Amino acid sequence: MRRTGLLQQAILRVLAALLAMVLIVAFFAVILQHAAVAPWCNACPTDPVAQDSRQSRQPGEQGLPEAAERAPAHLNTQQPGHPLFSNTEIFFAAAAALLLFALLFQATLGRWIMALTRHVRQLQTVAQAFIKQRHLSQEMRQSLETVITGRQDEIGALTDSLLQLTQDVVTHTANWQHHARQLEESEARMRAMTHSLRDALLVFNAEGDILFCSHVCATMFACQERDLLERSIAHLFSPNWLDPEWQKKWILSDLTEQATHTRAPMRGLAVRMDGNEFPIELTISQWQRQGKIFCTAIIRDITNLKILEERDLRAYVNRIAISALLEIGIEPLPLHRKLEVALEIILTVPWLAMQYKGSIFLVTEDEHLEMVAQKNLHNALLSECRRIPYGYCLCGKAAQARKMVFADALDQRHDVTFDGIREHGHYCLPIMLQDRLLGVLNLYVDHLHRYDPEEEAFLTTITNTLAGVIDRGLADDRARHMATHDALTGLPNRLLFHELLTQELKRTTRTRQVMAVGFLDLDHFKAVNDTMGHDIGDLLLKAVSDRTREQLRNSDTLARMGGDEFALILPAVGDREHALAVCNKIVRALSEPFVLHGHTCQIGASIGLSLFPDHGESVELLLHAADQAMYLVKKAGRNGVTLYRGHD
């Protein structure tokens, strides 16, 4: 539809109104002109208005008729008689002209202006309602369509454009609101997800500035979210883990124009706002958006995990330690050696907060504690604590009470002190086999060490295992002693003597020292045994072994070979004269009378000696030479000492 321009309509309507006005003015001017030339004096006598006018004029006044009479003749063209229009007719004519002008104005311009004003007000009302409601109602739409239909000018075109624009705005607003709701729902889901995660979530840029952090992250670092947004991610980690500059290089070094990737998790230490450190596992993922590089950091607090791992590690170490103790228990070693190894195992358990020193005591038959194994103890303690009674010092108190004694410092319970003793504490635990006390485990801790129930539980398990090791060791020692020692005298038997001689021969071969080997045979023992009985004979053999041991050094060996025969090993004896002197002391000691249960026994001893390396460098040669020398003493009259003289 062709639309007429608003300006064109206005010009046309204004011209029409002006034309109407010109016509009316011209018409009215003609009327006035006729009214002006009509003689007022010749007014109709029957005209009441004219008569009143003439009657009211005073003498001497010059009115309009007189002036007309004096007017020039060429102007007075009217014939005497009535005027062309009366005043009333002129008035009504003027009124009619004005009314006609008003009608013409209304018809040409007024109605158009009113319609324009009405349509503009409609547009204003619709615009205000739309701004307020943010919605195009059906009533608004009909109002706009009415304006569009009623106007074929710019107002109509503007209204049509406004309708389309409004519809577009409504459509885009609806779409925007839909997308906004979707975004809010997505953000709500994302926030709910980040809140439900037990891991902290961070987003930072290539410079390390934190752009986003989850609520869990703020809780983890004991702060508000806004506090983290003001920091760099490198400042969240402890300098005890990595140097801050190194951290920054490690975190930001790979932030290049590369494809999206995720680094392998790395464990370290983070620091909270209050300065407390805690273990974490850090995973960093790199991604890009609009040409910029960003990273997502997932931080997991592994404090509980570390506790579980440490607990599992402790349990694993504990199993290894206990297994090692059980293996030591079945090793063919002397008990004191087993306990030394066991003490070493206990002191090297990594998680125990123990000093590398301690001791193990065993119970003696007279209810004392005897130290059988120790590690790094002071010499004063070795002498003072070698043998202690029940109730003495912490170890004795643990044995007496049969329960653990803990001390975090040197207190009045410490009965053993010495100059220069350092501050320390103790764990003293009794070693119990059911209700039987076998010994005490004594361990050292640092000064003011805090009691740890887990340490006590583990050490109790250790002492229970040690109880089995000690019981097995005591049984093994008894069996070994029975197998290698004489049951009557307790001296090494022939089997053990050969083993000891072999070991001493190897050592002497390395040192090239002189060693003496002797055979000792009792003189007249058979007569005592036959006349006084076997009991007295057994007592005599015990007395002989005791008296002979008194004449020897601790390094010397005395063994019973069987019957009334004994053997000697004198290592590092020096020379033959010294060896002969020792044997002569033995002969003189055994020549003294023995009083046994009221019986006096008089015996003697014949000893044959051989020397290493003079008489041989093997066990067999030395024993053979000593045996030959002993028989020479027997032949010579007994009760003496003879050194092997070779084939002489």
Image (spheres, grey):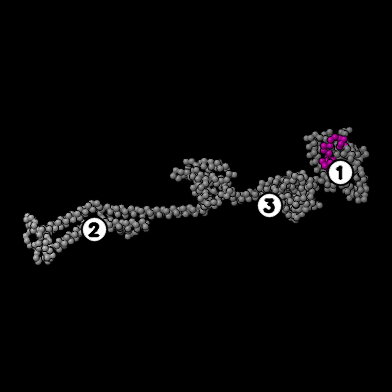
Please tell me whether mark 3 or mark 2 is closer to you in this view.
2
Quadrant of the rendered image containing residue 53: bottom left
Q: Position of residue 541 (x, y in %)?
A: 88, 46
For the residues bearing labels 3 and 1, Cβ distance under 8 angstroms: no
Tag 1: amino acid: Glu
- Tell me the SS state at disc 2: helix
User: Which residue is at a point 40% across and 54% down the rendered structure image?
Assistant: 177
- Specify the segment rendered in magenta: 551-580
Please tell me whether mark 3 or mark 1 is closer to you in this view.
3
Q: Quadrant of the C terminus?
A: top right
Relative to residue 212, is residue 64 drawn left or right?
left
N-terminal-most mark, 3 or 1? 3
Please tell me whether mark 1 or mark 2 is closer to you in this view.
2
Circle 3 residue: 451
Residue most extreme to the front: 60
Distance CA(mark 3)–CA(mark 1): 50 Å
Closest to the observer: 19 or 322? 19
For the residues bearing labels 3 and 2, Cβ distance under 8 angstroms: no
Disc ID at residue 550:
1
Q: Position of residue 327 (x, y in %)?
A: 70, 47
N-terminal-most mark, 1 or 2? 2
Measured along the vertical axis of the image, is residue 398 above or below residue 501? below
Distance CA(mark 3)–CA(mark 2): 106 Å
Tag 3: amino acid: Tyr
Closest to the observer: 533 or 302? 302
- Assess disc 1: are there few (<14), some (14-19) or many (≥20) residues with their C-alpha within 10 Å of its C-alpha: few
User: Which residue is at a point 84% across and 43% down the rendered structure image?
Assistant: 559
Say whether residue 392 is visible: yes
Circle 2 residue: 111
For the residues bearing labels 1 and 2, Cβ distance under 8 angstroms: no
- Tell me the SS state at disc 1: loop
Count of numbered marks? 3
